[in-house]
Every structure is written in C-alpha cells, then in structure tokens.
Amino acid sequence: MVLKQPEHSSLYKTKNTISYKVKILILGSANSGKHLLSLKYTHGFTCSFKYSIGVDISVKDFTLPNGEKISNTCWTFAPQERFQHYWSNFFRGASGAIILFDITNPESFKEVKLWVLSVRKHINYIPIILMGNKVDLNYKRVITYEEAKKFAEKEKFAAYIETSVKENVNIIETLELLNELIYYHLKSGKETFNPSDFDNSLKTKINNLKLTR
C-alpha cells in the first residue's frame, strides 16, 4: 500500500520504524487554559520556543501503540486581534488541533466557532478535538456537556473531551488520542478528515475518555 501524504505532514523511515512529523495547533480564548496546557506539555518536551508575535512553539516525540513514532510541533496561539494577520501563515501545514474553552465562561464557548472557522479558512478539514476545560470548577458550570457535545458533532469535531488542565484530568490522554486520529487520517490518504470514517476502536477510545459527571 502506498501511503499518500497530505502536504501538511512529513513521513520518514528510520531503520524499520516509520515516523511522522506533525504540527498541532492549540487554540482558545484568553483564560481558557491553553497556556497552562502548553506549560504542562512543555515539561519533558524536546525543545521550546517563545515568540513576541502571538505564538509559542514546543516539540515532543510520542510512540504510538503499534510502535510507530510521531514528532509533534505544538503551536499555542494568543487570541489577540493584533496577531490575526499572521494566522494564515501560522496555521499552514497543521495536521491537527485542540480548541479549548472554559465551561464556566459562555464567552469562551462562543469564541470556539470563530477559531474553527479560522482554521478551516486556511487549511483543509483536519482532526480537531474540542476541549471543555475546568471541570474542577463544575459547580460553576454554565456550558453543559450535552450542549458542547452537540455543537462538536454539528461542526464535525473529531471528539469533545472534558478536562481539567489544573488537575491533569484527561490531558495526556487527549493529546495521545489526537495523535492517533492524525495517524489514522494520514494512513487513509484522504484530503479532508471526517469523523464518520472512524473505525470501532477509535470510537471506543473516544467514549472511554468521557468524564463521569
């Protein structure tokens, strides 16, 4: 089987191991938790860069269950309008994305729509996970699980996962899931990602990440 590689990824082979280099976007409103998420990921990252033009870049290598490797370059974006004219260049080449919102803040949920539209304006449909953060503040919740999940399904997100970046709930698991979704998409050879193409193993993995409420 010839593995067709979309232009937003690269494939290389070392000895008997096939590896992928992929770019991941980490997006969301101010105070949604994405910078704390980035800091948590930075621990143990291969390298990290900070820029004054609204983006931090970190790199980490992961090994998939089948032994193949993925090298992530994670780009964490500031939401300020003054940086938006850079986004067309910064989004280019992305293989997947995480968009965060704060379940206690309705304005951060409204911004999700703007983020996903911005991504899809500049690149093809890629695997995107919607992350509802701050479940440690569940008593302050204003966005229900059902509302967010329905929105994610309508907008063809790969999954909706509820998390607490502060308490490390579903954090590593979400990134590992995104890596598997990216790998699945790259192997499919399709230009655009569609969650309806999931096999049963991926559906099961997503369902297992549902937070008990």
Image: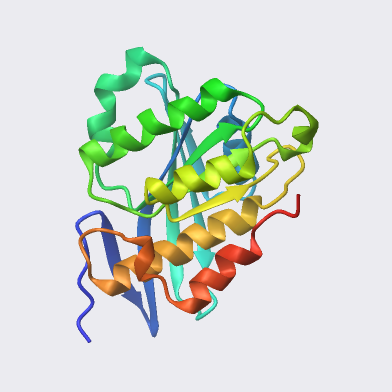
121 or 186: nearer the eye? 121
Q: Quadrant of the N terminus?
A: bottom left
From the viewer's perspective, tell me whether residue 213 is left or right of residue 204: right
Based on the displayed image, in which of its 4 quarters is residue 90 positioned?
top left
Return the x and y of residue 21 as percentages of the image width and height: 36, 59
The residue sitting at 30% across, 32% down in the picture is 118
Based on the displayed image, in which of its 4 quarters is residue 83 positioned?
top left
* Placement of 114 over or under 157, stated as above or below: above
* Placement of 172 over or under 205, stated as above or below: above
Whether residue 66 appears in this view of the structure is yes
From the viewer's perspective, tell me whether residue 187 is left or right of residue 180: left
* Placement of 66 over or under 86, stated as above or below: below
- The mark total stands at 0
Q: How is the image coloured?
A: rainbow
The residue sitting at 44% across, 51% down in the picture is 153
Looking at the image, the residue that sits furthest to the top is 82
68 or 77: nearer the eye? 77
The residue sitting at 47% across, 26% down in the picture is 110
Return the x and y of residue 20 as percentages of the image width and height: 36, 65
The residue sitting at 41% across, 70% down in the picture is 198
Return the x and y of residue 144 as percentages of the image width and height: 63, 38
From the viewer's perspective, tell me whether residue 49 is left or right of residue 4: right
144 or 31: nearer the eye? 144
Whether residue 77 appears in this view of the structure is no
* Placement of 139 over or under 186, stated as above or below: above
